[in-house]
């Protein structure tokens, strides 16, 4: 291998390393970061982000799109011993501050759910009433991050696959959004619910979907119940019908709509 080839390879590896470091820092900064958060994992399609669900530093399940509960990107519980969880109201305040920093007047908090491992929030667009994106709040630090999984990989407007829009500048810069399907969802609500229930029948016997669902750009998110109580949630891709089970929440505690 001649010196020119070695130099080219060395430069390429250096650029990739710097991009990874920069993206990690940007993720920690939330939407104010240059990339707004790119490190996340993919579910059924078998793709793993650099630090995602079953990628280089993950240990999740590529079939269900899992991510370790203690992973900081999943709002996990990797916190000092004897730490006390924040209150529900503090979690709401953290999300409101996040949206204030996001600086988009069309966005509003729609719902917050408290789980064993994190708080989960749905942000909606005032102008359309549709879901914009999903957030997680660390139960002990109050730190807010974009939810991993479908919110990042399937969200065609605010996720990292969204090209130059929303939270997704990195997708466009690196060309990851090429081939990403956009436009009106081709999977109807009824088809999404059917796919979700079939997945539950096979993987969560006795679970039933809740009566409503949240529709986002590129996918749906649905809660499911066991014995009439919230037991978890999953998402369905709005173009392929793939199902992604959210394994990072833990047991449901409470919720509030806004």
Image (cartoon, rainbow, N blue to C red):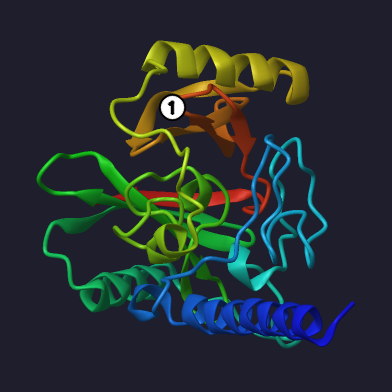
Residue 187 visible in the shown view: yes
Tell me if residue 195 comes above or below residue 42 in the rendering.
above
Of residues 203 and 139, the one drawn nearer to the viewer in this rendering: 203
Of residues 158 and 246, the one drawn nearer to the viewer in this rendering: 158
- The quarter holding residue 156 reads top left
Q: Residue at x 68, y 47 (%)?
A: 247
Of residues 11 and 145, the one drawn nearer to the viewer in this rendering: 11
Q: Residue at x 72, y 37 (%)?
A: 64
- The residue to which callout 1 is attached is 238
Left or right position of 217 against 148: left
Tell me if residue 190 comes above or below residue 233 in the rendering.
above
Left or right position of 5 against 104: right
Q: Residue at x 74, y 86 (%)?
A: 7
Left or right position of 135 against 58: left
Q: Position of residue 169 (x, y in %)?
A: 38, 65
Q: Position of residue 182 (x, y in %)?
A: 35, 34
Element under label 1?
Answer: loop
């Amino acid at each position: 291998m001649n010196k020119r080839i070695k130099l080219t390879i060395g430069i390429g590896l250096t650029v990739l390393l710097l991009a990874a470091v920069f993206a990690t820092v940007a993720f920690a900064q939330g939407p104010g970061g240059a990339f707004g958060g790119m490190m996340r994992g993919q579910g059924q399609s078998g793709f793993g982000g650099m630090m995602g669900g079953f990628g280089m530093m993950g240990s999740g399940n590529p079939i269900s799109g899992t991510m370790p509960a203690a992973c900081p990107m999943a709002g996990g519980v990797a916190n000092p011993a004897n730490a006390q969880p924040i209150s529900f109201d503090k979690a709401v305040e953290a999300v409101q501050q996040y949206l204030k920093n996001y600086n988009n007047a069309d966005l509003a908090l729609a719902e917050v759910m408290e789980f064993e491992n994190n708080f989960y929030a749905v942000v909606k667009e005032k102008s359309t009433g549709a879901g914009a994106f999903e957030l997680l709040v660390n139960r002990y630090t109050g730190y807010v991050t974009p939810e991993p999984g479908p919110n990042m990989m399937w969200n065609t407007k605010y996720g990292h696959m969204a090209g130059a829009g929303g939270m997704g500048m990195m997708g466009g810069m690196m060309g990851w959004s090429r081939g990403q399907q956009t436009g009106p969802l081709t999977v109807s609500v009824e088809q999404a619910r059917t796919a979700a229930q079939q997945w539950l029948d096979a993987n969560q016997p006795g679970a039933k979907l809740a009566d409503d669902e949240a529709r986002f750009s590129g996918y749906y998110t649905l809660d499911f119940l066991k014995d009439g109580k919230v037991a978890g949630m999953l998402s369905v891709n709005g173009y392929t019908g793939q199902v992604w089970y959210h394994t990072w929440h833990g047991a449901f505690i409470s919720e509030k709509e806004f």
